[in-house]
Every structure is written in structure tokens, then in C-alpha cells.
Image (spheres, rainbow, N blue to C red):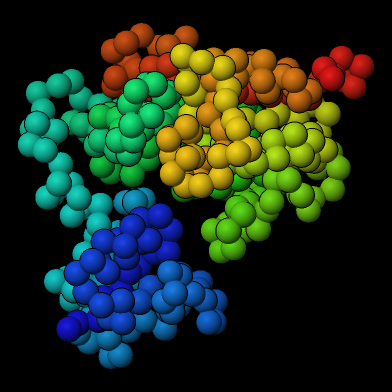
Amino acid sequence: MKKTIIYGTGDYGRKVYSLLTKYISDKDICFCRTGAQENEICEGRKVINADNLNRSNSDDAQIIIAIKNRKIVADIKKILTKKGFLPQQIVDIVSFFEDNLIPEQYKQSDAAEKYCMICQNIVDHFMPAGEKTELFIEKKIIGGGYRENVICPVCGSGDRERWQYYLIKHETDLLSESCRVLHIAPESSNYHMIHANPMCDYYTGDLQVGRAMHQVDLTNIQFCNAFFDYIIANHVFEHITDEKKMFDEIKRVMKLDGTLICSFPICMDEDTFEDPAYVSEDERLKYYGQKDHVRLYGKDYKQHIEKYGFSVEVKSPKDYFGEEEIEKYGFIRNDVILFCKKMDDSSERQ
């Protein structure tokens, strides 16, 4: 059996691993990533540093590049080729998905051309994505579940990322002025956009080690008071149990005139719902739509966030664009991103 090397330890890499272990022994699988630390482990398997990967010690290996950003994938392919790996040894999971799993109606669509604002490419379709969970379908959750018009086939950006990109570019000075930013669970496409601003003091954070510059627990942030001009956190808050402590910490590290840019899945049929008694994966899947969610934000989302001492401005594609443009740019029509400012102590709601 050939050794299988999964290049990438993120969501794509873990999903590929989960699929492969149904058919081959996990003893024949290892992970690889750029900058991997000594003795780093992913899914119980050793992670090889990409610098140490070469054909001389992996002559019969099959390498699966499990990364969605097409530019990064192209760079990795060039590196692997220079190391002597043959084209037939390298599989790009996004290309495989597009070539083999996308229905013909998406490959040969007569629909109007789409335009990805992030990579600035015209494409004939955006690919579908998202999980078909019962709750997401039943309650028509905004920003969650299966959707048709999601992934750019060139850069791999999703619908939420493109809407975030538009707002950051047109509604902030984040890309052109001096500022300090904390970006939680950073989306790769928007990471590169923000990182390109040389005047931006840019910090990325994630609860899981190795996924960002800093390991950051939003309920116990390690940075000092009034440190950041912007904090960006998209589809993060629904994972955090102690919501009040989280927002207290976010306010603490935000400057007085700072901005929190955030989003989360929303059910417009009911108010925000959570029950501390629901702790099992099955219960959370049933009531919140995902095994690692701890609440389901509802139609009162604006007031719900404001009670923690923020003034909230709602940004939705339907208020900026017509229906044809929303379809062209691959946005979710009624998606919501919130721009939140700290209220003065005197006006903060108790």
C-alpha cells in the first residue's frame, strides 16, 4: 500500500482523513503542513514539516493537497514538483471535487456569469456547500446549512467571506490606514487581503493551537485594555458557552472608538435560544443545528448583542444590492454582518 500524505491539517485535511480511514489503514496515512512543529500530531498521526518532505524518502507516496485556497494550492504544487514529485502523485482536493462531484448543471450552466470580488475572476458558477442538517433546513437558518451559490472555484472563497470582504473594503479603513486588528478564526482569503496592508498591526487568533498567530480564548483574552481598533469574529460566538464573559473581554481589549465586526447563523422564526442542559452532540445538533454550537441566534439578535453594552449596525446584501447583483457576486441575500461599537458606561444597558 502506498503511503498517503495529506497536505493540510485544517477542516479539509481532517475530513479527507476521516474519509480515507473508511477504506485504508490509518497506519498508511500521515499529515504534512508548512511550518509543522517537531512532534506535532493531527488526528493521532504525525505531521511532517513540508521542508522535510522530499521524493527520496516518499518515492511511492500519494499526496493529497487538502486546502481550499487555489493560489496556495498552486504554490504547493510548484514546491512539490521542484522536490521531484510527479504530477500523478499529487491530488488537489478542490480540483477533484470540481471535476468529479459537481453536477453537470453547474459545470455547463447557461446562467449569467458570476464575479468573485476577492480573486476578481469571472466564473460561470459558484459551487454548492454546507451541511444538510434537519434544523438548518426546517428553520431556514441564515448563513448556515446547504447552499447552492457558495464556493468560488478559483480562490475557494465562500459567500460569507465575499460579503465580509465587500464591507471591510468599502465600510472601513482597515485596508489603507494604520490600525490594530484582532481576527479570530481568520478566513484565508480575507487574511491575505488584510495582511497586505503594511500599516495594519495584524493579529490572528484561534482557540486551537497552530491555526493562527496566537492561541486566543475569547473569554480570557491575553491582550491589554483598549488595544484593538477592530476585532473580527465570524461564525465564532455560537461556539462559546460563556457569552457574557466573552463580550466583556472583547469590550475590554477594544479601543473606545473600536469596532467589532461579527456574524453568526440566524433563525428569523424565533428569538435567540440556548439551554445549558443541552450538552451532548445529539442535543446540540437537534436544537442548534451543529454538534459544536451552544446556542441558536434568533430574530432578536440585534437587541441580544446590544444588551452586552454595544450599539449595533446591521449590514445585509439586500440593503446594498439588487437581486441580480446578489446572485452575480454570490452573496446570501439576507446575510447579516454586524458592526458593533462600545456604548459609554453611562448608556450601557444592564
* Vertical order, 69 against 247 (above or below): below
Give left or right: position of 224 versus 15. right
User: In the figure, 63 relative to 276: above or below?
Assistant: below
In the rendered image, which quarter contains the C terminus? top right
Choose between 245 and 172: the one closer to the eye: 245
**Residue for point 51% across, 47% down:** 280
Q: Nearer the viewer, residue 105 or 265?
A: 265
- Measured along the vertical axis of the image, is residue 99 above or below residue 8? above
Task: Name the residue at 30% across, 35% down.
Answer: 132
**Residue sitting at the far front:** 277
Rendering coords of residue 194 (x, y %): 56, 42
Q: Position of residue 107 (x, y in %)?
A: 11, 36
Can see residue 87? Answer: yes
Q: From the viewer's perspective, is 153 left or right of 166?
A: left
Q: Where is residue 35 drawn, in percent x and y?
A: 51, 72
Q: Quadrant of residue 144?
A: top left
Residue 299 quadrant: top right
Q: Is residue 187 among what the camera can see?
A: no
